[in-house]
Image (tube, rainbow, N blue to C red):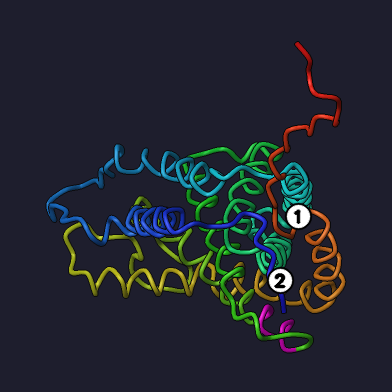
Amino acid sequence: MSTTHAVPLSKRSGAVLALASLGGLMMLTWPLLVQVDPNSQRLDPPFLFLALLPVVVAVVLVEVSEGGLDSRVLAILGVLSAVVAVLRGLSAGTAGVELVFFLIILAGRVFGPGFGFVLGCTSLFASALMTAGVGPWLPFQMLVSAWVGMGAGLLPRRATGRWEIALLITYGAFASYAFGLLMNLSGWPFLLGVQVPGHEGSLAFVPGAPLLENLQTFVVYTLVTSTGSFDTGRAITTGVAIALLGPAVLTTLRRASRRATVTGTVVAAPAPTPPVPAPGRPATR
């Protein structure tokens, strides 16, 4: 099956994207990586470190699109971003982005990892503007959603037909749970004294505690607060949407990709030849 990379990734762009993703992952997990004073009563995040996240996202977007976006590809990106923003507004607000991921995954599958990364960023940013959801959590949502779209573009290309739909459903479930886990991790360290009904003891981050102890607490916190409800609902609705709408949407997107992507070889025009003078009588003195 042929692949259309609407936003092609050069080696340098791929390296920048990989380094930015590593930096973003470190920004999500910094409380588990930084040594914190156990006698501290509050957790002071490295605000300069966190402030770099929007800059990292912007640098990646510029680097990925440095070769220039074709006007037709840019139009498709704008339409899909608007559709994802509307779908997010129609979803159950507190239950996550249930109807968002299926379109990001399908578009990343068709147009490639570069397009999926850009779509994940732009669509979440557009939906935040529409729903007044701009806040310190937005850069994390943009980055993690970009990873979802990029991952869909990196899935094996040999799967076709029903196997492709099954692969996308499986990936959609994995991405739904991973999104919830990473977003929980971005805010969990700042929830002091978390008490969950039906669970004894606090599930809050403990500054200075051993890494494994905090990880265990975080896993329990995620399982109790989101895995069985929000994340599972997101995984189910994403899988159902891909199963029901996936074949038709994939066909539509692939038809659009063939029209939006110019294929072929550009050949330089031959240099003009000098005109040949017409034969005439020799000049006389």
Three-letter amino acid code of the residue under disc 2: Thr
Main SS of residues in magenta: helix
Seen at 64% across and 80% down, the residue is 157
Q: Nearer the viewer, mark 1 or mark 2?
A: 1
Position of residue 25 measured from the top left corner of the image (x, y, whole percent): 37, 59
* Range covered by the magenta-colored residues: 163-169
Position of residue 178 measured from the top left corner of the image (x, y, whole percent): 51, 70
Seen at 26% across and 42% down, the residue is 46
Seen at 52% across and 45% down, the residue is 61
Alpha-carbon span between mark 1 and mark 2 = 32 Å
Seen at 77% across and 49% down, the residue is 76
Tell me: 98 left or right of 31. right
- Of the 4 image quadrants, the one containing the N terminus is bottom right
Q: Secondary structure at mark 1?
A: loop
Q: Secondary structure at mark 2?
A: helix
Crowd rating for badge 1 (residues with CA inside 10 Å; few <14, some 14–19, many 20+): few
31 shown above or below 3? above
User: Decide: marks 1, 2 in contact (CB < 8 A)?
Assistant: no
The residue at which mark 1 appears reads as 262
79 shown above or below 246? above
Three-letter amino acid code of the residue under disc 1: Val
- Pick whichever, 278 or 246, lies toward us: 278
Crowd rating for badge 2 (residues with CA inside 10 Å; few <14, some 14–19, many 20+): many
Is 202 in the magenta?
no
Position of residue 58 measured from the top left corner of the image (x, y, whole percent): 48, 40
Say which mark, if any, is on residue 238. 2
Tell me: 235 left or right of 202. right
